[in-house]
Amino acid sequence: MSDRTLAGQFFDAAIGLLQRVRDEEAESVTAAGTLLADTVADGGRLFAFGAGHSSLAAQDVVYRAGGLALMNLLAVPGAVGVDVMPATLGSALERVDGLAAAVLDSSPVRSGDALVIVSLSGRNALPVEMAMHARALGVKVIGVTSVAYATQTTSRHVSGTYLKDHCDVVLDSKIAVGDAELTLDTVPAPFAPASTVVTSALLQAVMATTAGVLADRGVEPPLLRSGNVDGGHEWNGKVFEQYADRIFYRR
């Protein structure tokens, strides 16, 4: 089997997953976008969190051309991406009880805000505790996860629950347990993960919905323009000034 054929199979798998979330998660996407629009209109702030590779989708909606200027990254030291050394430390931190509460309590997150939590498995202590503690603080929580993990794996949180159990809105990425779309008889392990593609698309669909809901209400969405087009920096500067009290990545 040629590499090109495998590439085509991966694209087909990713497209199939995107079609599924488009069709099956439409109501949840609308609910999530509306929740964020409500938060913006009510003066709240927006945050996104993800650990390890799940952080890629969270970072993709922060300080992004064409994106909402109010989306801030909630970072957990050592758990954002794979830049921590050794990279396996990030995975270990996801299982530490108490870390999420400590981060939230020292962050600017407060009652009336909204927090997007991205976790493919939703089984580790960090995302579960993050959702539980955020809601206890009066924060609305949107979870982006694969619901399949809740029926095929064991929770690593002391409560025995998963991220999906502590959210105001759940977006199911439909990713199969193990996050690998392809197999070959000559390859001993499944390969080709698609969770980043699908999760990022889900979140951008939510961002688009948020902008549309705000516009329908007569509220100009606080969107950023690309700094690589003429006038982009000037446009963004005005947005930063107008919403300075709700943007934290410039401080």
Image (cartoon, rainbow, N blue to C red):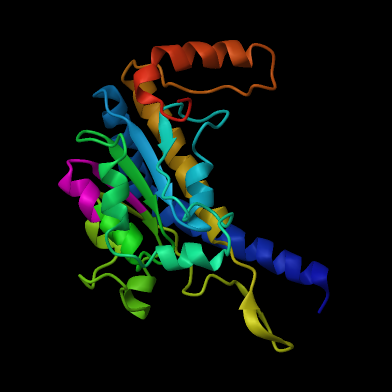
Q: Quadrant of residue 235?
A: top right
Q: Nearer the viewer, residue 225 or 243?
A: 243
Residue 69 in picture, x, y percent from top left: 46, 26
Q: Is residue 186 above or below residue 67?
A: below
At horizontal 40% and vertical 16% (from top left) the residue drawn is: 220
Residue range highlighted in magenta: 132-143
Q: Nearer the viewer, residue 239 or 98?
A: 98
Q: Is residue 233 left or right of residue 4?
A: left
Q: Nearer the viewer, residue 164 or 18?
A: 164
Residue 125 in picture, x, y percent from top left: 32, 65
Q: Is residue 81 above or below residue 232?
A: below
At horizontal 34% and vertical 58% (from top left) the residue drawn is: 127
Q: Is residue 166 left or right of residue 50?
A: left
Q: Is residue 181 left or right of residue 2?
A: left
Location of the C terminus by quadrant is top left
The number of callouts visible is: 0
Q: Is residue 235 left or right of residue 6?
A: left
**Is residue 37 visible in this depiction of the protein?**
yes
Q: Is residue 169 above or below residue 210?
A: below
At horizontal 47% and vertical 51% (from top left) the residue drawn is: 22
In reply to whether residue 123 is colored magenta, the answer given is no
Location of the N terminus by quadrant is bottom right
Residue 249 in picture, x, y percent from top left: 46, 30
Q: Quadrant of residue 221?
A: top left
